Amino acid sequence: MSSWRQTLTVLVFTFLTAAVAHAQTPPMPQTDLTIGYQSLHIPGQNYPLGIGIGMSRAITDVVRIVGEAGVSINQDSSPNLNGTLTLYQYGVGPRITGPGGRVIPYAQVLFGGVHSRADLTTPAGAAFSASSNGFMVQPGAGVIVPLTRTFALTGGFNYRRVIFHGNNDNETSVVAGVRIAFR
């Protein structure tokens, strides 16, 4: 093989290796949108159907500002409780991300609110509806697994402390979704 072919082969190999390495660890985007499934647990109740949406913006390479909102629904048809329980949550706060790589860990603390609503039918057949609002503090942690420069899988666990008037809730949620990067 001639020297120019060897040089060209080495250059092509180096370029492809760098491109593959760069594709494996894409940089964090300035702004991203996450959409996903969430399952909520409140002591004594599970809300198996939920959706969450979040947006984050880079402040530094490690610190981001995050806003999240979601809804969780529980359809109950027991003799004592028949109807729908719905919980809406929204919050904003800082997120700290770990070093980039195949899996990017993060930790965050969100501050916001919760609105819970019950639309039920009593055992006597009468309609019952009630709702309440509370302050929320939600620490959480998770991972981001980049698939491409635009798309990533996300997963996380959150503990949510909700302070209602005269009552406090300790809630946990598991989330899984897709992140879309805006560059």
Image (spheres, grey):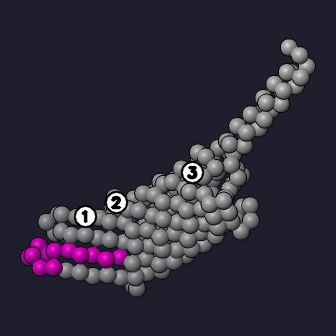
Q: Is residue 131 left or right of residue 66?
A: left
Image x and y of residue 159, in percent: 50, 64
In the structure shown, which secondary structural element does the residue marked by tag 1 occupy?
A: strand
**Residue nearest the viewer, comparing 163 with 37:** 37
Q: Is residue 45 left or right of residue 127?
A: right
What's under tag 3, amino acid-wise?
Phe
Q: How far is disc 2 from disc 1 in space, using C-alphas?
A: 9 Å
Identify the residue under disc 1: 75
Mark toward the start of the polypeptide (2 vs 1): 2
In the structure shown, which secondary structural element does the residue marked by tag 3 occupy?
A: strand
**Is residue 150 among the parts visible in the rendering?**
yes
Image x and y of residue 113, in percent: 47, 78
Mark toward the start of the polypeptide (3 vs 2): 2
Image x and y of residue 89, in percent: 44, 73
What's under tag 2, amino acid-wise?
Leu
Q: Is residue 5 left or right of residue 70?
A: right
In this view, which residue lies farthest toward the right? 3
**Is residue 41 among the parts visible in the rendering?**
no
Do residues under tags 2 and 1 come within 8 Å of each other at their CB atoms?
Answer: yes
Label 3 Cα neighbours within 10 Å, binned few <14 / some 14-19 / many ≥20: some
Q: Residue visible at 18% across and 63% down?
A: 77
The numbered disc on residue 49 is 2
Identify the residue under disc 3: 151
Do residues under tags 3 and 2 come within 8 Å of each other at their CB atoms?
Answer: no
In this view, which residue lies farthest toward the left? 124
Identify the magenta region.
116-127
Q: How far is disc 3 from disc 1 in space, using C-alphas?
A: 33 Å
Residue 11: quarter of image: top right
Judged by depth in the image, the label closer to the viewer, 3 or 2, is 3
* 120 within the magenta span: yes
Residue 19: quarter of image: top right
